[in-house]
Structure formats: structure tokens, C-alpha cells
Image (spheres, grey):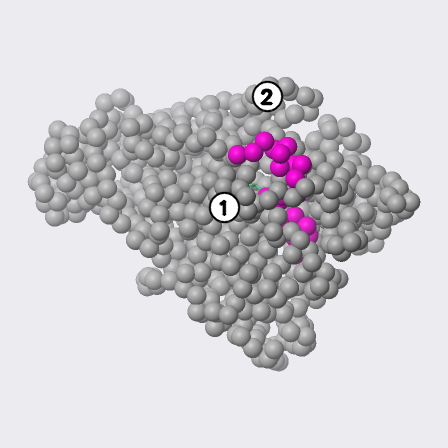
Amino acid sequence: MRIEQRPEFQIHLQNLKSKEQLYLETIFSVANGHFGVRDSNPLQGNNPNYRGTPGLFINGFYDYYEIQYGEKYTGYPVNDQVINRLCDPRYIRIKIGDEDSSVNYFKVDTVDKNMDMQTGMLHEIFSVTTPQGKIFNLIVESFASVEAANVYGIKYGIVPINFDDEVEVIKVHDYVNQKTSSTVSDVRVNESQGHLQLDFLDGYEQPSYLLTTYKSQQGSLLTFNGSGPKLTYFKDENNHWGYHATYFGKKGTQKEFEFLFSIGAVYPLVNAQMYADQYLVKLNEDIKNTSFKSELMASAQVWQTFWLHSDVEIDGDPEVQLSLRFNLFELYQSAGKDSHTSIPAKGLSGNGYGGHYFWDTEIFMLPFFIYTNPELAKKILMYRYETLSVAEQQSTQFGFKGGAMYPWRSINGVEASAYWPAGTAQIHIDADIAYAIEQYYEVTGDDDFLDNYGYEIIVETARFYMEWGNFAKINDQRRFVINRVTGPDEYSAVVDNNYFTNKMVKFNFRMVQKYAKRFENTELSKRLGLSPKELNRIKEAADLMYLPFDNEKKVKLQDQNFKQMNKLDLSKIDNNDFPLLLHYHPLMLYRSQVNKQADTILADVLFPSGYSEDELMRDFDFYEPITTHDSSLSQAVFAIAAARVGKQDQSYNFFSQAIQTDILNSHHNTANGIHAGSLGAAWEGVFYGFAGVINNAGTFTMNPKLPARWNSVKFRIFLYDSEYIFTIYEHEVHVSLLSGTGTTITIAGAKCDLDNESPEQVVKY
Ligand code: BGC
């Protein structure tokens, strides 16, 4: 197979505005959802004299470290979980004559880098100068296979430029914790290193290792093989096994060496130790009798399938087009695909946020997968089912009789947020998960998921809220209230009746009711002990849910007391003082009307039906001026809201900023990893914003409003059992049924019945 390199799928160094090294390490990281490898200087290894933060991250492979509190109250999380930064598999040691890159300082300059998003291959050229002035080119190709989750491939080409001399290539990986030169003082980054051990496993005729963590008691295995001229398995001067080749390098002549790694799953430590042999045999299967090229091609085929179903083609806006592709590419690179892992907020491109999963997955990234790759969406949701029992324990430890309390941030399901006011208090996470389950079911009709996993989560999360909240009188009316919680806006904490939370919880309660009949007298409802009395109470709570509203301004109130606070005048704040969280005491922000990110506006976006455009406009006009967008999750949400109320220019501005968050490094912290939630939100901007999709209660409607500069936008989606392709022009929508039996969809008010008899329709609007 030969894939033609299409320019509109290339992330090319020369076209990036920033050339800052740590930023490039993130942008050019390769990943497949199981592991990610940051880009790096390949000669760096563990040498602290080089500037860089390289490393291999395995999704779900973390260690604990004890959180140090000044005052530790009951129930505070004991441990944080931090994804392990493992040795950089890109590392190679090169000797030229009597100079050795591991001892002498070889100066490495990047000549070029290109990520081909069609195939997932990173192609780089470095120019290397030894202290004695010998210059050679190092050409590196690498990829993380999306076809075989364990496989990482790297190929080196060495070309002497100004010398003929003895060359030795050595590939030994003898350390496990990757050293970095970074000194970030950002509360959002945790640079703690796991307490890890690397055991070399003898007798495999290729380097094979057991990687174990001391505190979290996890284990993984790693093995690699190599091929190239005169490449042999050998023991270096430190008695470490690896590969080496010695040859006489000639000016202008390239020699190539390729290596395939097989990076294992994450197991409990005992299993990893006990079954190491068996696991290694299996891991080796993936990389023996094959080659860099075959594995790359197999992976590229999967990327082709990905693009076929998931690409969004914009005609008329090349910069936004490329950024959007980058976002989709990164989302697929980041998504855990094994049902045991989810999508870290920074993908697998860095250890910002410790490799934790947040609500970012369910609210901002999952919709893209639900509509373009429902099987993967199911796997991502399965992670929440896998950790349900932990969430149940957390709820009882918290002091409740039952229910499930999902963590605000975590890898293994146990709460890891050390700052509870903007962490654990965000109890909307439960309802976010329930919302995502309903959305998945709405689009796929996957009964297996709802019956065996989804409904149980919906019930247990609802139970948690029934215990947290209570019935109370407000203005002489009986209401269900949810007090002392934090909504999405992290500049307002521990508030009463956060509109977003209450609205989401109401929805969660309604879902319990909606499916109650379906589960009546089933094994599941017996196991859950769901009685008519409990169901009635949940219904009553939903009916009476308090949703704060300002009757004078006629806007939804972010929380019950939001109106009473003074506005923080954002125009008086120096540009250098953003994000505010790094410059103000949290209470200074909590006591003011200032938003870090979309909160009430997000509720408007997630529940688009039932409000007039005027109402939505009032909300928008109230919240937009007080929002800093210090969270990268904010702008895309405002883009959707603006599109819905017809503020086209503002919508496009928000959208184009959101979509370029990482490509332009607009939050100045892409060096710590991509902003995966923001990347997903940008897709939502196209789908829910410009295409104007509303999909609930069995209906799919589209009310497009294209940005003025776009000639058209084209995308595919799966809906119910069918796949469709839409092309939206300024005044026309073309839709075709590609597979499945079809359904009725409404475009700009016109009903279209799509089936195999009439698979295509054109609607003018
Ligand atoms: C945002 C949260 C988000 C987290 C991880 C924070 O800055 O305020 O909403 O979940 O980042 O992306």
C-alpha cells in the first residue's frame, strides 16, 4: 500500500508559529491510547544536561505519592496518582571514532519535523555535530501503532556529512524513570516521579523488562527487537543487554536501523511477576516476523479507516481545517481503547494533570466518538462501569448509605484531588457520566450497554444525589436543593444550588424514571433493590428540583447567591495576570462574579430544547463579559451558544480560538501536554454549533449556520444503526445514507425520510 502524502494532513515544523522545544515535544508526540511517546532529542536519554521533558507514558500506569497537607481533615485523599514518566524509547547512543554521545556533548539541531496524520508517522531530521566537529544527519521515523496497541516502531538513518570514520550504534534502555530538565511551577503540573523498578528478564534473546511500581503495586512488561546492518544482541560495558552495530561510516552514505517495541498492558504487580513469561511470549508475537514497514502500513490502514468515518472537511478555511484535523488526530491518539482506561485530560502527550481522567472525557470528548466510532465510545464508557464499585465505596466512606461517588479526577477510580473546593466538590461528575450514557444510548440504541452497565450507573449516581440533596422550602415552595457544591466554573466554589449541577441531576433523576419500566422485575432491579417508593421519591425530587433564576434580569443564575456578589472588572486586570488562578487567592475569585469557564452557558448548550432564542441570548449576554476562559474548555462552549443565538461572528471567533488551543499554544502550557477536552469541544463546535445539531428523545434535527467564510463543511456520523454523510453549504444541505436502514431526520424544519429506496436528499434552507 502506498499512501500519497496530502499536504492538508501534515503538521510541519516550518508551519508552526512556535518552535519552542517543550511545546514541540507535545505537538509531535505519537500515541495510540495505550501509550504515548513524547517527541525528544533522540540522543538525550537520561542525560540531565539536555533541555527536555521526554518520556513514555502508558495509559493507566501510575504510582502513588502521599499528598502532603498542612492540615489534613477526615476524608481527604491520602494519595495522588501520577502517571509514570518512563524511559524514552527514542533514545539511541552513537559513537563516532573516539567520541561517544553518552559521554561527550553532541550538539543536536532540528532540521525538520513532519507528522503525517494520515499514517500517524513522525518523520524527523536532525543535524548532529560532535565536539570534534564531525557532522552527521540523523533521520528518525517513528509511530505508535493503532492496529497493534502494544507496538511502537522507530527507525534511524545515519548519514555522515563531513567524515569517514568508525561508527557504533547502541540501543540499550537501562533506566526506567525518565529524568527531565523541567522546572515548572504551575499547580496544574505534577512532576512527581513514581517509585519504579526495572528488572531485566534473562533468556529472551532480546531486551525484555519487567517494570514495576513500588507503591501502587502495578507491573508492565516491555520488550524490543532490532534489525539493521551488522546489528547484534550484545552486552554493554555496564552489563546491560541491548543491540549494537559497528561499521565504517562513509560520507553521504546512509545506514538504517529499525526497532520494534512491544509495550505491555498494566497488571497488578503479582500477576505481572507471576505470568511475566507468558505475557512476554505474547508481546513478542506482535513484533517478531514482521518489520517496521509492515507494522507502519498496518497502522496506517487503521488511520485511513479513522479518517474515512471521522474526518471533517471544511472548504474555505485552511488554517482551521488543519487545526481541526490535528484535534481529531490527537483525540484518537489519546483515547484508551481497552475498556479499562479512559482519556487523560492531557492525552498521553505529557504528564500535566498527572495523567488523570476528568469530566472532560464524558462531556467534551465522548460526543465525537459516539457519532463517529460508537464501539470505541462504549469502551471509553466501560471504564466508568469498571470503577463503579470504587465509586460506591467512596460514597459509603463519605458517609452515605449507598449510591456512587465518582472521583473528580483519578486514574484508578479513587479520588485524587488534593484541593477539594475545586475538586471533590464538583459532584456534577456523576451526572455528567449519566448524561453521557444517555447520549450514547440515544445515538446507538445499544441495549446491551444500557441493560448490563449503563442503567446501574444511572441509578447509583441518582442515589448519591438523593442523599446529598434534600427537600426544603424556598419562597414558601417545596423544592429539592443541592447545597455546598462546585459547578464547572472553578472560580466559584462550594455554592448552593449551582444551576448546572441541579439541571444535570434533574436529568439524571429523569433517566432513572425513564427506564424504570424497562427494568421492572428484572434481575438488575432486584439486585439494585429499586422499590416503587424510591422511584417515587426520585421523581418527586426531579419535579421539584430548584433551578435558580433572576426574575429581574430574566437570566438563569449560576447559583442561588450569584446575584449578590460584585463583578470583578476584567478590563482592569493586567494581561499578565491571566489565568487568574495563578495570581489570585482562590477566595478573592470565589467572592466575585467572575467565571473561569462556561457553567450556566454549558447547561444551555447541553439542554438546547425548551428555551426561546431570547432567553438564551440573555444568558449569553450576562455570562460572556464575566468569563475569562482561563480553562481551555470554555471557548468552544461559548462558540456553540453564540451560534445558537445567531451571533455568527462571535461564534466563529470563539471557535477558531478554541480549535487552535494547542496548535497556537494559546494557553502557554501545551508543553505539559495537549488539551484533549478542548480538542473534543472544538468538534462539538462544528457539530452542535455550526451544523446546529440537536439530538434527543428519538429526534435528530439540524439547523445549520455556517461561518461566513466557509463554503461548505462535510462530515459523516453514525446514528442509530446507520451511517450518513452530510455536506452543508451556505443555503443547502446534502445528506446521503451510506449504510443501514435509515431514519427520519429534520433539517431546517424539513423532514427527510432516508432509507434504501431514497438514500439521498437535498434540503434548501
Ligand atoms: C478545568 C476543569 C477541567 C480540568 C482538566 C481545569 O482547568 O477548570 O473543568 O476538568 O482543567 O482539563
Q: Where does label 1 land, which residue?
A: 675
Judged left or right of residue 168, residue 514 is right
Please determine whether, in this image, residue 181 is positioned above or below residue 532: above
> What amino acid does circle 1 point to?
His
Left or right relative to 445: residue 93? left
Instruction: Identify the residue at horizontal 56%, vertical 77% (top origin).
Output: 731
Using the image, determine if residue 432 lies above or below residue 417.
Answer: below
Which residue position holds label 2?
69
Quadrant of the rendered image containing residue 244: top left
The image quadrant of residue 484 is: top right
Q: Quadrant of the N terminus?
A: bottom left
Is disc 1's CB within 8 Å of ligand 1?
yes
The outermost residue toward the front is 572
Residue 299 position, x and y percent, is 40, 53
The residue segment tinted magenta is: 583-605
> Magenta span has 587?
yes
